[in-house]
Amino acid sequence: MAEIKQTDMETMFPLIEATIASGGSVKLKISGYSMYPLVVSRRDSVLLVKADSIKVGDVPLYRRPDGSYILHRIVGKKHGDYVTMGDYETKKEYPVSPEQIVAKAAGFYRKEKFIDCKSAFYRFYKFFWTHTLFLRPFLLNCIADIGKNKKRRLKVK
């Protein structure tokens, strides 16, 4: 099978939707930094499957009213709708209706190594990230500082 190098979601959506609706899965390259540190933009991918059930901690692919496709974590539920937030963000998005959800993540490819959403590592990560929302600004600053220091160390060598 030929690999598609790059295209927009609007062009691919009918194929993605049909594949997922028929019980298949789709692997998509991540674009954007909202789910960092779990995945890195343009390097890592997500494995999407049908979203038969959604709960807090899951990562659905959903479509905003403006037509953009977003991959964020469910951090709450209110009045039948979902509250979402990217792992590298401090602002919650609400409402996301169940009808907006296209698929959900079954796993992630980090540098081509597969991380199953059912694995112990991922379940710990999900639990930690959804139960420390109040610490998110501090945690994100620490991650940014670590990244800056790593770059400095690399330049010195």
Image: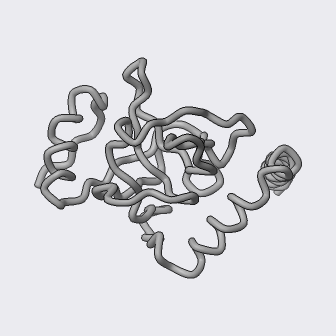
Q: Quadrant of the C terminus?
A: bottom right
- Taking the image as drawn, is residue 108 in sight? yes
Question: In the image, what residue occupies the spot 44% across and 72% down?
Answer: 116
Q: Nearer the viewer, residue 113 or 131?
A: 131
Question: In the image, what residue occupies the spot 50% across and 62% down?
Answer: 110
Q: Residue at the bottom extreme?
A: 120
Q: Quadrant of residue 26?
A: bottom left
Q: Is residue 109 above or below residue 78?
A: below
Residue 9: where, in percent of width, then height?
A: 30, 31
Q: Nearer the viewer, residue 104 or 154?
A: 104
Q: Is residue 30 above or below residue 122?
A: above
Q: Quadrant of residue 92?
A: top right
**In the displayed structure image, the side of residue 79 where residue 145 appears, left or right:** right
**In the displayed structure image, the side of residue 149 where residue 128 appears, left or right:** left
Q: Is residue 81 above or below residue 103?
A: above
Question: In the image, what residue occupies the spot 57% across and 81% down?
Answer: 120
Residue 12: where, in percent of width, then height?
A: 21, 34
Residue 1: where, in percent of width, then height?
A: 11, 55
- Taking the image as drawn, is residue 155 in sight? no
Q: Residue at the top extreme?
A: 66
